[in-house]
Amino acid sequence: MPHADPVERQRYNRDYKRANRWRYRRRQKSYDAATHANERSARSGVVGTISPEDAEAILDAGACHWCSEILDYFAAELDHVVPMSRGGPNCPSNIVASCDPCNSRKRSGVHPDQWAEEHEVCVECGQTDRVHAGGGRCARCYRLLSRRRAQTD
């Protein structure tokens, strides 16, 4: 067995964790975010749970859903589009990545759909019949923008 010596195994594990600190930090962020959302959901009596893998995929969006600000993985926060306080489910389809200012504005009582109501048409394609997402873009254009940003990173 490699590293049969307990002292050598401990040294190896410590060195590995130091060399891969970013991996552990990233995993911990997604685990904490999912746990927090699931605990709030259970306290509120809202259906649904998310896994740390779901949280990681959402936090990887690269941009705030509401204002399109480019976000670092560690600066992003999970945000329920339809808040749990209004009966929104705790599922990946209802959760987006958000920057702290946008998430705080929602927390402080601003109407959750404010960002979509600021624009009558999509700023990218001009469509009015599509549901608006963040930054004045329809959901389709927002997804395309997120993909373009992910490809450039």
Image (spheres, rainbow, N blue to C red):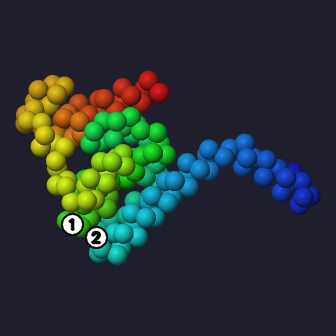
Secondary structure under tag 1 reads loop
Question: Going by the image, does 76 lie left or right of 14?
Answer: left
Observer able to see residue 131: no
Instruction: Indicate the position of residue 97 as horizontal and vertical percent values.
Output: 36, 46
Nearer to us in this view, 48 or 13: 13
Q: Amino acid at mark 2?
A: Val
Q: Quadrant of the N terminus?
A: bottom right
Instruction: Indicate the position of residue 13 as horizontal and vertical percent values.
Output: 78, 52
- Marks 2/1 in contact by CB < 8 Å: the verdict is yes
Q: What residue is disc 1 on?
A: 87
Question: Going by the image, does 15 lie left or right of 92?
Answer: right
Q: What residue is disc 2 on?
A: 46
Q: Residue at x 23, y 30 (%)?
A: 141
Q: Residue at x 26, y 42 (%)?
A: 66
Whole-angstrom CA distance, mark 2 to mark 1, is 7 Å
Secondary structure under tag 2 reads loop
Q: Residue at x 16, y 28 (%)?
A: 123
- Find the residue positioned furthest to the right: 5
Nearer to us in this view, 30 or 135: 135
Q: Residue at x 31, y 54 (%)?
A: 104
For marks 2 and 1 on the same chain, the one whose residue lies earlier in the sequence:
2
Quadrant position of residue 147: top left
Instruction: Indicate the position of residue 28 as horizontal and vertical percent values.
Output: 56, 55
Mark 2 is surrounded, within 10 Å at the Cα level, by few (under 14), some (14 to 19) or many (20 or more) other residues, namely some
Q: Amino acid at mark 1?
A: Gly
